[in-house]
Structure formats: structure tokens, C-alpha cells
Amino acid sequence: GAGVSQSPSNKVTEKGKDVELRCDPISGHTALYWYRQSLGQGLEFLIYFQGNSAPDKSGLPSDRFSAERTGGSVSTLTIQRTQQEDSAVYLCASSYRDRVGEQFFGPGTRLTVL
Amino acid sequence: EDQVTQSPEALRLQEGESSSLNCSYTVSGLRGLFWYRQDPGKGPEFLFTLYSAGEEKEKERLKATLTKKESFLHITAPKPEDSATYLCAASSGGSYIPTFGRGTSLIVHP
């Protein structure tokens, strides 16, 4: 079966522009996570969706970051007015609700802000 | 606040030279301890879940063990294809969000 897919794989943008990153989770997985990974850093949690519940946004670094999940499936992470410090790999993962750590990750989107 | 610390940051081994990676954790009521493998340019790949002290899991040349304060990933007779970054994560009883360590970068030379 298909794994988690993300698009685009690479995104280069200019400072101040908005970007949208897409994640297609594994069918049947009700939990969806967004993480950010910078060089030499661990995975930084951004946001967590579970079914139709309100998302846990506690990891979003600023109000320039937002995410939505439509129909319990596809998710979009939006970064407004991008800054150079937003440059990183953005990873999406999905899992079954009760298998917190057994997450299936996508290949990531590498974002470069010039 | 949950914390996960991995050591060493980097490890170089010769093919066949067994070793262990360490993951120390501080969480309130461990829900699970997780190991992942990450290859360059790819997302992490799930390896193991450990739930309670004394538990062990094995997969090919890898064996994960768990105590009340730390977990070890033992690599027996590694091969060059075992080269990757190994990530450890832990979640506490009330959370669906695991805390990840920074990883150990393993290079196995032929």
C-alpha cells in the first residue's frame, strides 16, 4: 500500500512570501503529525491532528504557522511571511490513534527561504 | 517537561564491530519508548516500541532494551548498510506527542 506522501519535495522561496506544504497520510490513520527538522537538531513537534478533535497546536513556533486537515485525511501546513529561520525539512507522519510512537513518516519537504 | 538524550552523537564502527547506542529519558509515566532509523534525505522509519522495563525487541542485527531510565540499541556485527541516524523517542502517559532525541549518527566502514 502507499505510504505517507508529501509535496513538494523541495521548495525555495523568498523571504516574506507564503508557502503551503501538503501531506497525504496513510489511509485509515486517524492521527497526523507535523514536525520540523533542522540540521543537527532533533525532530521539533509542530502540530497534531486526531480524527475530528481540535488539533494540538502547542508546537507551532509563531502565529505565522497554521495547518488544517480536510476530511480527516489530507493536511496542509501554511507558513506566512516566511523568514530565513524557517528553512528546514518539514516532515509529516501518520499513525493509528493508539499507536503514538509507531508513526509512518513521509519523505519531507525541504524548505529554503532566501 | 519530558526529555530524551541520546549518546554518542556520532559513532564510527568497523564492519563486524558490535556496539550500543544509548537513550536516556525523563518522562512522567512512560507510555512507550520508540526507536527509529533515518537515512539521509528520508523520513524516519519506525523500528521498535518498548513499553516496560526489562522488555527487549529484536530485528536482524538490532536489539533494543529498556530500563527505568534508559534504553539501549545494541548492534551486533554491523554491516555498512546499517549506517544511518538512529532516533529515540518517548511519550508520557497522558500525551499522544512523543519527544524525540537528537539522534546518533552511525557510520559502519567496510
Image (cartoon, coloured by chain):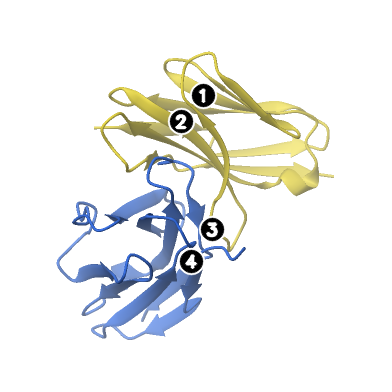
Chain colours: A blue, B yellow
Asked where in the image residue A12 lies, by quadrant, the reply is bottom left
In the rendered view, would you say A8 is above or below B105? Answer: below
Which residue occupies 75% across, 27% down? B18
Q: Mark 4 points at which residue?
A: A108
- Residue B73 at x, y percent in the picture: 61, 29
Q: Are marks 2 and 1 in contact (CB under 8 Å)?
A: yes
Q: Is residue A83 visible?
A: no
Disc 2 vs disc 1: which is toward the camera? 2
Q: Residue B43 carries which label?
A: 3
Q: Are marks 4 and 3 in contact (CB under 8 Å)?
A: yes
Which residue occupies 40% across, 50% down? A43
| Viewer-closest of B13 and A9 | A9
* Three-letter code, disc 3: Gly
Categorize mark 4 by other alpha carbons within 10 Å: few (<14), some (14-19), many (20+).
many
Q: Name the residue under label 2.
A: B33
**Which chain is mark 4 on?**
A
Q: Which of marks 1 and 3 is nearer the N terminus?
A: 3
In the rendered image, which quarter contains the C terminus of chain B? top right
